[in-house]
Amino acid sequence: MSIFDNTTSKGTFFEKAQRFGKSFMLPIAVLPAAGLLLGIGGAFSNPNTIRAYPFLNITWLQNIFTIMADAGSIVFANLAILFAVGIAVGLARSDRGTAGLASLLAFLVMNSTIHSLLKITDTLAKNNLAQAGQGMSLGIQTLETGVFGGIVVGIMTYYLHNKYNKIELPQFLGFFGGSRFIPIISSFAAIFLGAIMFVIWPHFQKIIFGIGSIVGSTGYIGTLIYGFILRMLGPFGLHHIFYLPFWTTALGGSAIINGQLVEGTQRIFFAQLGDPSTTHYYIGISRFMSGRFITMMFGLIGACLAMYQTARPEKKKIVGGLLLSAALTSFLTGITEPIEFSFLFVAPALYVLHAFFDGCAFMIAHMLQITVGQTFSGGFIDFILFGVLQGVSKTNWIYIPMVGIPWFFLYYFSFKFCILKFNLKTPGREDETDEISILTQNNTPASANQNRVDCIINGLGGKTNIIELDCCATRLRITVKDGNLVRESLLKKSGARGVLKSGNAVQVIYGPQVTVIKNELEETLNL
């Protein structure tokens, strides 16, 4: 029996991976706001910045920046608990509040158990916690399990919640049945989990360090492969599963900052962001993050221009507006699905080429030691906050436009050549019977919202066919009873840019406005 499903039906791997992947989106969703606070506050309160721009040295202004930096840094300092709660809530099918509370309790109990075992075995570090592999978590001195520990707790809690949330106890214990049983059983299970982690985590940490060193030893080619795989997983919505271990665990490297052991590329970056003694950001950022800016701010913009220029003259006006909107979204926010899904299904070879170019962008960023960090995307906003405002000496941000401009032309000429050479049906080049509606931006007036919702529900096989409904940054993620009832034509008429279906798991790509669509659906379905 899979931990992702305790029903008798056997879901596909895609269904299970989709549910696991989308559960990451809840904790990830808070990172952009926290990153903005930390980026702006840390950048403008940094002593080096104040020396360069003396007009910022105003007491009340610096107090505001300090508060912003602290408010952002506390989020990244507690990513483990965010993932513990977020994954439990994201995976739970019902009664998600109980799952979240139970996961919080389990996380506390697990770390408290580890703390007790460290005291009992007289291995509790008195100083140099980082060298001992220990750290502080919510005021508890424990082993530094990081985000991995939070993920394990979240999965364990979900499994127990899914298995026991409808349990019926004997009458004299009836009050503790059902949902009330979940925090109890999760807390007891967390004691055993803590004992297990106390024994195996030091060895597991050595293995992670070893894997990280292997990734490091592959050099630039390894970075290219990382970028290629990351982009190829994007259409399936599974890329979160791939990159998060590098961003948040020791797979992405480790560093001691202000006497604390920090693991994971993104966590190291944000720890260094608040450290005025930092002279150059961690090199792992150039491997696992910075290449995105080259592709999202420049490369895909060239692809949009190529698709516009190769569109039929009578369709250029419609396609131009749609591609311009998609290009701006990619450039400003780093969200690329509106562009990628415009050619993924009609010209998959172009997508493979795009993935290869993206891998090369990561490799070049590594070679040039570009260390511009990010929250969850590689757009202009993050580029300014975490690149330009941090200074060239720390980030080498100047190389991004220097590489990006040639990258724009690389995408432009290669896409234009392939589209014309192989007569690819990119936007504006469809047959007369094809509908351009797959690129509709869904900027529908309020009076049309219900029609869109009805169209989506009918496209998913009706209300009774929908089991689960959720979304990530750009796509609806749905589990249905019968995948054969899903009609892609109706979903595309509702404004979907693309539809992915595997068994009973369905993903419908709409773009950044997907959360509005999800809320409309939940209201109609009374979820």
Image: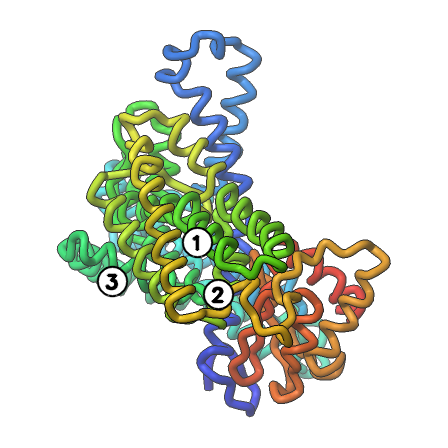
Q: Give the residue at x 42% y 11%.
A: 53
Residue found at the very far left of the displayed protein:
217
Question: What SS does tag 1 mark?
Answer: helix
Q: Is residue 484 left or right of residue 24?
A: right
Query: What residue does disc 1 label?
Result: 303
Q: Position of residue 281 (x, y in %)?
A: 28, 34
Instruction: Kindly check if marks 2 and 3 are in contact, taking CB atoms under 8 A apart as contact.
Output: no
CA separation in Å, label 2 and label 3: 42 Å
Mark in the foreground, 2 or 3: 2
Q: Amino acid at mark 2?
A: Phe
Question: What SS does tag 2 mark?
Answer: helix
Q: Amino acid at mark 1?
A: Ala
Instruction: Kindly check if marks 1 and 2 are in contact, taking CB atoms under 8 A apart as contact.
Output: yes
Query: What residue does disc 3 label?
Result: 204
Q: Give the residue at x 34% y 28%.
A: 275
Q: Earlier in the sequence, mark 1 or mark 3?
A: 3
CA separation in Å, label 1 and label 2: 10 Å
Q: Is residue 481 left or right of residue 74?
A: right
Instruction: Kindly check if marks 1 and 3 are in contact, taking CB atoms under 8 A apart as contact.
Output: no
CA separation in Å, label 1 and label 3: 43 Å
Q: Position of residue 318 (x, y in %)?
A: 64, 55
Q: Amino acid at mark 3?
A: Phe
Q: Is residue 129 visible?
A: yes
Query: What residue does disc 2 label?
Result: 343
Q: How is the image coloured?
A: rainbow
Q: Residues within 10 Å of mark 2 (few under 14, many from 20)?
A: many
Residue found at the very far right of the displayed protein:
447
Q: Position of residue 493 (x, y in %)?
A: 70, 71
Q: Earlier in the sequence, mark 1 or mark 2?
A: 1
